[in-house]
């Protein structure tokens, strides 16, 4: 029997000074091991909701009401240091653009070492070994030979694989994938989506997909939550949302879904 992994309850986010509300009364329960998609157009509140879960809301914007619980513990009552410690170890983030998220001035091995040393107190040798394992797990060929490379020396798809490996490095049980394929061409997008789906199975993780494109998560999400203008429109099983939605807005989103399979060339291997 699964128990909720993440509970977002009546979450309201807005400006600290004026109290103007940006996300209002959003409630989403994510069962352990499930894949839930948070879907909505630009400005609907997906990113702010995700940042609230990670304790990373921008300056001046705050949680005005409600709660966020991970494994039953309220995250809002934790002090900021304890909260930050959860990022990486309990919740891994796969960002939109790996190029922007990786440090351009450090080689890959050093970036993994920084994370593994800080979070898991690993020695240099242990972190090197673990980095090779992680790169292998995300499908980087000949990982040993890639350790001294910099982010710009990988192709876009390979870079996103490295980013996923980094997100997995401390063994989080939840992965938040924030539009993880927007910077990639369509063929590579599908490979990255399949990779995250496979890792979810292998590592028994809960996954939260954040996307404006319902088509991206078709077949990948068990549940779908639809946001519009900071409010939850509906939340249900993927089957219900895709085939039996009663909401005009969701149906419009579905109708506007660009197809994933319109034949861009496969260039992921280009910079291997
Ligand atoms: N730092 C900020 N300062 C002021 N307003 C903000 C800030 N971040 C977000 N907002 C506002 O909050 C609302 C929700 O934004 P949010 O970024 O969560 O939407 P989103 O669904 O993630 O959109 P996108 O797909 O474009 O990232 C929008 O009206 C946006 O303008």
Image (cartoon, rainbow, N blue to C red):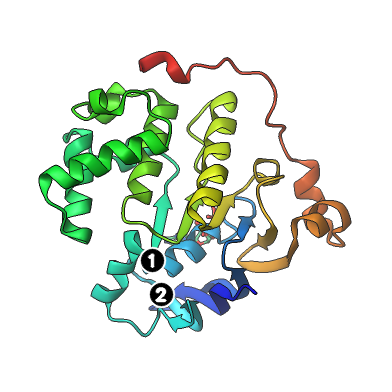
Closer to us: 38 or 250: 38
Crowding at label 1, few (<14), some or many (≥20) Cα neighbours within 10 Å?
some
Query: Left or right of 84: which side holds 6?
Result: right
| Image position of 256 (left or right of 179) | right
Q: Is 105 rendered above or below residue 48? A: above
Q: What x and y, as percent, mark residue 16?
A: 39, 77
Residue 102 circle label: none
Image-quadrant location for residue 139: top left
Q: Is mark 1 within 8 Å of ligand 1?
A: no
Find numbered disc 1 in the image and state the secondary structure of the residue it sits on.
Answer: loop
Q: Quadrant of residue 259?
A: top right
Asked whether the viewer can see residue 19, the reply is: no
Residue 165 vs residue 233: left or right? left
Q: Residue at x 45, y 43 (%)?
A: 96
Whole-percent x, y for residue 183 in the image? 48, 33
Q: Looking at the image, which residue is at 18% across and 27% down?
A: 148
The dot on residue 62 is 2
Q: Is residue 93 above or below residue 51?
A: above
If the image is split into quadrants, where does the C terminus sit? top left
Q: Where is mark 1, residue-wise?
A: 57
- Position of 38 with respect to 272 (left or right) is right
Q: Secondary structure at mark 2?
A: strand
**Mark toward the start of the polypeptide (2 vs 1):** 1
Task: Find out whether the residues at labels 2 and 1 contact each other: C-beta distance under 8 Å.
Answer: yes
Label 2 and label 1: CA atoms lie apart by 7 Å
């Amino acid at each position: 029997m699964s128990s909720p992994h993440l509970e977002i309850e009546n979450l309201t986010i807005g400006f600290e000074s004026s109290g103007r509300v940006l996300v209002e009364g959003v409630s989403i329960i994510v069962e352990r091991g499930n894949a839930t998609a948070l879907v909505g157009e630009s400005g609907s509140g997906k990113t702010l909701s995700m940042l609230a879960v990670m304790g990373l809301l921008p300056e001046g914007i705050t949680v005005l009401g409600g709660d966020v619980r991970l494994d039953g513990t309220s995250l809002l009552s934790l002090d900021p240091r304890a909260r930050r410690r959860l990022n990486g170890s309990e919740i891994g983030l796969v960002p939109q653009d790996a190029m922007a998220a990786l440090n351009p001035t450090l080689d890959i091995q050093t970036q993994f070492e920084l994370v593994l040393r800080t979070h898991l107190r690993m020695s240099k040798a242990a972190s090197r070994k673990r980095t090779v394992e992680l790169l292998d797990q995300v499908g980087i060929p000949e990982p040993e030979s890639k350790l001294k490379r910099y982010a710009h020396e990988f192709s876009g798809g390979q870079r996103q694989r490295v980013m996923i490996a980094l997100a997995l490095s401390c063994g989080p049980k939840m992965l938040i994938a924030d539009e993880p394929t927007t910077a990639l061409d369509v063929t590579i997008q599908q490979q990255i989506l399949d990779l995250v789906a496979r890792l979810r199975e292998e590592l028994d993780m809960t996954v939260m997909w954040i996307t404006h494109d319902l088509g991206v998560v078709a077949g990948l999400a068990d549940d779908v939550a639809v946001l519009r203008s900071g409010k939850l429109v509906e939340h249900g099983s993927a089957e219900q949302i895709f085939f039996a939605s009663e909401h005009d807005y969701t149906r419009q989103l579905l109708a506007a879904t660009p197809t994933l399979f319109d034949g861009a060339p496969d260039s992921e291997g280009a910079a291997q």
